[in-house]
Image (cartoon, coloured by chain):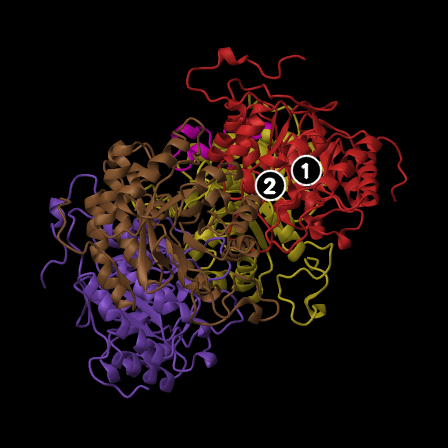
Chain colours: A purple, B brown, C red, D yellow
Amino acid sequence: MAPSTFPPRAARPAGARLVDRTDPLTTTLVRAGGVVVGGTEVIVAAGPCAVENEAQLVRTAMAVKAAGARLLRGGAYKPRTSPYAFQGLKEEGLALLAIAREVTGLPVVTEVMDVRQLPAVLAVADVLQIGSRNMQNFTLLEEVGRLRRPVLFKRGMSATLDEYLLAAEYILKGGNDQVILCERGIRTFEPSTRSTLDLNAVPMLKHRTHLPVIVDPSHGTGHAWMVPALSRAAIAAGADGLLIEVHDDPAAALSDGHQSLTPQAFAELTRSLDAIAVAVGRTSQSAPFPEPLA
Amino acid sequence: MAPSTFPPRAARPAGARLVDRTDPLTTTLVRAGGVVVGGTEVIVAAGPCAVENEAQLVRTAMAVKAAGARLLRGGAYKPRTSPYAFQGLKEEGLALLAIAREVTGLPVVTEVMDVRQLPAVLAVADVLQIGSRNMQNFTLLEEVGRLRRPVLFKRGMSATLDEYLLAAEYILKGGNDQVILCERGIRTFEPSTRSTLDLNAVPMLKHRTHLPVIVDPSHGTGHAWMVPALSRAAIAAGADGLLIEVHDDPAAALSDGHQSLTPQAFAELTRSLDAIAVAVGRTSQSAPFPEPLA
Amino acid sequence: MAPSTFPPRAARPAGARLVDRTDPLTTTLVRAGGVVVGGTEVIVAAGPCAVENEAQLVRTAMAVKAAGARLLRGGAYKPRTSPYAFQGLKEEGLALLAIAREVTGLPVVTEVMDVRQLPAVLAVADVLQIGSRNMQNFTLLEEVGRLRRPVLFKRGMSATLDEYLLAAEYILKGGNDQVILCERGIRTFEPSTRSTLDLNAVPMLKHRTHLPVIVDPSHGTGHAWMVPALSRAAIAAGADGLLIEVHDDPAAALSDGHQSLTPQAFAELTRSLDAIAVAVGRTSQSAPFPEPLA
Amino acid sequence: MAPSTFPPRAARPAGARLVDRTDPLTTTLVRAGGVVVGGTEVIVAAGPCAVENEAQLVRTAMAVKAAGARLLRGGAYKPRTSPYAFQGLKEEGLALLAIAREVTGLPVVTEVMDVRQLPAVLAVADVLQIGSRNMQNFTLLEEVGRLRRPVLFKRGMSATLDEYLLAAEYILKGGNDQVILCERGIRTFEPSTRSTLDLNAVPMLKHRTHLPVIVDPSHGTGHAWMVPALSRAAIAAGADGLLIEVHDDPAAALSDGHQSLTPQAFAELTRSLDAIAVAVGRTSQSAPFPEPLA
């Protein structure tokens, strides 16, 4: 495989960190299955917040694929604020993700919360997700730095961009440069949204680092009806992709239903992204043929 | 003039505030000179942070008009954090704005900080700007509520959207519904930008109120190089327009030079907005013919 | 009257601002009536959020005096988030404050929101209060800078301490050094309290400026039951005084009842302050003799 | 040993969480070595941010003991923002902590970052510290919930108090009620301090939970010179103790030197706490006899 960054590491200026951008144009290409994040195409990862059962997952996975998603996301291990909330299907959820990948061909993104979960997650995940609450779980970062599996690495809820890049540096320092950054909303005083999606972060991160940057408007707003507007805004701001929660019956979801799109709303969203992507010199893949979703 | 809102006030549901959206589609049209904010066209207001002298202002005004700006912004009374910073040209600045309007035909947006400045500002301003620091200067809001002049009303730096709408209500309660809301960045923990531009506010405000919503990416980021990306994002998020600082020699600007675009960069920006506007069902007016700006 | 600061202005280091501390020990003494803020004695200003009627005000004023308050606070002009909330008794409220001062001998602290209110407020107020929302109402600051009346100047809800001191500089620059700073809580992500009282601000402000610093735990927490603990903490942190809301019937208060102490709770609080004050080398004046409050 | 909470769990109201306060007076007593946290005595844990070598640690431990500290804190595993910063002495640091405990008799508080470190840390730690960055490392919380070792559990930098208590619930749910909460500063917009120490949290947490609450003014301010004022404020606000960084040569410290007190400054601080503790009905243990520190 061709080197994913330019210039090669040996040519880095003294003092530069591994995450630092050293030329104005290059973005590191992160390859997961046949999908490339950081290239011309805007990549959408979509799926349920939590894997709940095979029917839900496969139906959702097929629908998001039909609508243009290139990666399937779904949580098997779920970090939940309350110990009394649904904690995910764990190993069983991983097995269902493997089935959904088999059926759809979509590479799978799923979260790992703990080094002890790594063997099981590595058996299934095409991309390891490290969540906001673990952004400074440095021993976990060091472990995934030793791997060569792509990492979708979310910004912490109150992490400055400097702290975020230094945390990513823990992964790159181990030799793994296949890191996708993900802005997912920050903590502010505003109570009407779950978080405040920080789209300033997109051009600022692209300015400072060669790593691709995607945006999660589902957590960033907490309201499904706001996701399309902010998805379009994220692409217009220069994001390399999106991470979107889709559930085939949001009202019945075991977690985060209020911020999950229906498959139909997701298909409408991806269609609306094409023109935005083109307007900023990118492409996107919405449903390529008349699909029977409605 | 036709009523600018629908349904008429008499038909409002009991308990609704005047700012509240009462039907899903209507946006109040704010008319300033021949320009309409809140319609299909995305409106760009541009100009220097502070009016400095006639040559600077007229050159900049002509350049932003040529590039598609529909309103001229420029500060005569400047609220400055330090009492030792340049405080604006005051009445002299207003006179220069009148000249620039005469030369370009662009309606003028300029800030009023104090009720005692109102007579002088009203003699020149097509749109009264009320700045972030005065968002809860309730006696000033009541005064402009009694006028029938349009108001560009900026969100306070740590105002919740509820507080912002209640502050706008002070203006509408007086009988003046010609209010343009403006997101300009909020206070967060992130130090790399001057403020954190909150694009969540765009769909949330559009959801709650019939007033048009524009975005100020110059203050929202504090970095001129970030303004184009976030301008495009704002329009993609559904904003009705932009407020952008342009200076013909940013390095020599008496205030906010680091966040001011050159006329050339501004022209490139407006050109890039057209496709974004179309992608979200709007129009925009960039330079309509090859202009000799460069 | 003896000069209130040392060293005299002429001796200031080049580049120092007027607010800057230039020696480690001196605090500017602010004199209001016979009361001195910034000396050894911890000063408590107390009274209702809003003046409502003569009976309420006089009863409360007598009670807070009996419990050790040295200044009477009460709002006649009230900045309210909603235009539909009680806006204060205005001139009538000022007249009632004059009566309460006559009855109790306590100097009066009351808010001025607008330069046009200054003549009426100056006729009654021993100390002019400038509220958080007006911290950067620079034209108002310039006006009170031209006066020689003491100013109780509250920190803005999201003002950095640098911005706060620069805003105070607007007052001192006009020649009025009789400024009392007041920390009243800042905006954070925490929803369980109205604001987050920032007691870091006390030692940091005392370190940087010679102006006296008091603390408002009523607004800083929004819960009457939290006020005693944070009042004690403020004095332990080095504050020169407190600003506390007291209402003789909090449940019936027209504004901020939930954060107002009863006179009895206030008397218990002031008694508890004595030992804290002594522990940090200060004095305080709680009820000096058995009073019939209970 | 007597039950540490009252009423016994069986008597909890339906719906109450294990962390919830169910009567107004009881505080869970956390016992570490012979030390009790949550009783009448204000407990001070002190020591270096990071264990660096035996001489430094033993000197510091003896000095803090002489000055009244009841627990020795010291980091062997250090979570550091940058991967290029000193990461702690790890197992070697634990061995030095064991020596310092042997010499001084002080029970040891030290951080565990990862479940894999637990066996080594459990061999030495009298109290397991879980740091801010791991407040929502739920798998780690579940592991320490299964133990019967006391836990010093720090609030996350942007955790609401609700989230904090729900995270503590993960530990109690496993059967371990020996949890000490620790406010250590939150993320706000204020740049002059490392964090904003949130003393609102002290009465609010004491109101909601039966767990003892201590305060870390070293991280909460980031400036050694601010630590004494905020330590006194914390005790006055009702905290059950303090966690303070002390280094025998702060200028040479490998981490956080700017916020570390010298042993002499620490001894002055503890002496100043006695009167504050008494003023709020507590006791504290400063140097009980003339010591040769100065």
Question: Please, is residue A124 above or below residue C69 in the view?
Answer: below
Q: Badge 2 sits on which subunit?
A: C
Tell me which residue sits at (58%, 28%) in the image.
Answer: C144
Instruction: Classify mark 2: helix, strand or loop.
Output: loop
Q: Is D13 positioned to the left or the right of A77 in the image?
A: right
Q: Position of residue A274 (x, y in %)?
A: 23, 70
Residue A37 seen in the figure: no
Residue toward you, C263 or C98: C98
> Pointer 2: residues within 10 angstroms few (<14), some, or many (20+)?
many
Q: Position of residue B13 (x, y in %)?
A: 58, 71
Q: Mark 2 vs mark 1: same chain? A: yes
Name the residue tied to disc 2.
C184
Q: Residue furthest front?
A: B1
Quadrant (top left/top right/bottom left/bottom right) for the N terminus of chain C:
top right
* Labels 2 and 1 touching (C-beta < 8 A): yes
Q: Badge 1 sits on which subunit?
A: C
Residue C294: quadrant of the picture: top right
Tell me which residue sits at (25%, 81%) in the image.
Answer: A66
Q: How many marks?
A: 2
Q: Residue furthest left?
A: A2
Instruction: Classify mark 1: helix, strand or loop.
Output: strand
N-terminal label among 2 and 1: 2
Question: Please, is residue B54 above or below residue A77 in the view?
Answer: above
Name the residue tied to disc 1.
C243
Q: Position of residue A84 (x, y in %)?
A: 54, 71
Looking at the rendered structure, which numbered label has been put on residue A230?
none
Residue toward you, C32 or D37: C32
Q: Is D41 positioned to the left or the right of A95 in the image?
A: right
Residue range corresponding to the magenta coloring: D245-268
Tell me which residue sits at (34%, 48%) in the image.
Answer: B107
Q: Is C124 positioned to the left or the right of D248 in the image?
A: right
**In the image, is residue C215 part of the stretch drawn in magenta?**
no
